[in-house]
Amino acid sequence: MRLRLLPLTAAVLAAMALTACAGRQPPKPDYDPWESLNRKTFAFNETVDSYLLEPVARGWDFVVPDPAQRCLSHFFNNLRFPIVFVNNILQWKLRKAVESVARLQINTFIGVLGLFDVAADFGVPRQDQDTGVTLGVWDIAPGPYLVLPFLGPSSPRDAVGLAGDAALGFYTYFVTVPGLTVGASAINVVNERARFLDVIKNAKEASLDYYTFLRNAFVQRRWKQISGQATEGGKPLEEDLYNEEIFENYLEHGDTP
Amino acid sequence: MKRSLRTTSSTAIRHSVLAALVAGLAAGLALRAGASDKSPSQVVDALSNRVIAVLQDKNLTTDQRHTQIEAIAYDAMDFETLSKLVLARNWTKFSPAQQSEFIDQFKRHLSITYGRNFDTYKNEQVQILGERPEARGDVTVQTKILRGGHADDVLVDYRLRQHDGQWKIIDVIIENVSLVSNFRSQFQDIVATGGPDRLLTLLKEKNDKGEPLQAPATPEKS
């Protein structure tokens, strides 16, 4: 176990070196100094999506009925147990850690190997937990917005977090056949894409600039996840978000924005 | 019975005065409530119930459904405040004519794009989780959209602000993503590079393209 945690420790140190501690300040949703590179990566991801992932997901969606898609999603989520459990411990959320053990047991044994999220219906809800969140709770700033090839919206901190997740993942411990890991991951990705076909299509049509739409949604969600773990409820991202008078004040002070 | 017969006239008067006071107070409260003083939760609850009633009505065509939901949403939301918040400091760069044009186009945009989400209604229900007071006297109403199993519930928060005694929605926060913040990010860039006119043109183009999709079974061109 100690050996297994080594990559994580290394990842954490790397993250600390990469980003300055920022005292859990809300990030600015439009802070994007790497935008021109990000937009290129984003365009690449969009191409991969529209020529490969989305068509495959459409086929999958046509063949696999919705309830089965949901079951598969629950199954893969159940396999995330080590990631959720260890990160709860790292954030010293012992109650949540116990809850995640309860979820694993209920869903594996009563929920037929995790195909049904019975625990959620029993009042033990699914937990959004990963190594990137832990790093955030530890006061490590995300750094600039970063679009990763294939993986999408991220940040230097969360990229390191993804490496931590991979090190903690179920496959690292229990699956020794490499082909199986790749196959299972592919099914997971296609299945998740299939479940959000309409949502993503609507989001693309609803936005004037899908790149900015995604960036903002990612930064908002991530901040809420982390500040919600750090303090109950979390803080709003932008202080002036609901201030109608802000623009008038700006004019009074003679600033031209 | 015996006791009441023995009561002196003075206590009887006192009682009747008290009764009148209570009745008056109750009537006053009822009147105030009647004057549309719905609490934020009641506003959101009424909104959800009305929308679900429309969605469950099998006799409506897609167009009729859209128009009815649109009317319900327009009633519950404060589009002027919403537009100001979305444009933030750019609001003053818009002339009064451009401002009202923006409110109209933004309204249409939301109606077209969010209207589509209702076409895939699968008997979802809405549960009000609670209220949370916010800065500036706002209130956030937390809700959950129930979609069968609890694992797939969607969290939707509504932020409301009181205007002339009425609570109206000024932001919708879906799974922790605020609509105001999201549109503000998108619109900022456009206004910065192309000014108000560019944003209005883009919105109008998008809306005109989106409109035919409202009619049932129109194939997409893309």
Image: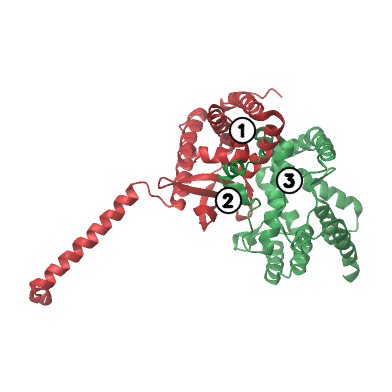
In the rendering, which numbered label is found on residue B70?
none
**SS class of the residue under badge 1?**
helix
A126 relative to A66, above or below: below
**SS class of the residue under badge 2?**
loop
Name the residue type under label 1.
Answer: Lys
**Can residue A111 be spotted in the picture?**
no
**Can residue A70 be spotted in the picture?**
yes
Residue B9: x and y in percent read 8, 71
Residue under pointer 2: B148
In what quadrant of the picture does the C terminus of chain B appear?
top right
B150 relative to B19, above or below: above
The residue mark sitting in front, 3 or 1, is 1
Can marks 2 and 3 be said to lie on one chain?
no
Q: Chain of mark 3?
A: A
- Could you tell me if the residues under marks 2 and 3 are in contact, i.e. CB atoms within 8 Å? no
Can marks 1 and 2 be said to lie on one chain?
yes
**Dot 2 alpha-carbon crowd within 10 angstroms: few under 14, some 14 to 19, many 20 or more:** few
Residue B173: x and y in percent read 59, 48
Residue under pointer 1: B93
**Dot 3 alpha-carbon crowd within 10 angstroms: few under 14, some 14 to 19, many 20 or more:** some
Chain coloured red in the rendered structure: B
Q: Chain of mark 1?
A: B
The residue mark sitting in front, 1 or 2, is 1
Instruction: Left or right? Give the position of A75 relative to A146.
Output: left
Chain coloured green in the rendered structure: A
Q: Chain of mark 2?
A: B
Name the residue type under label 2.
Answer: Gly
Residue located farthest toward the front when viewing the structure as drawn: A254
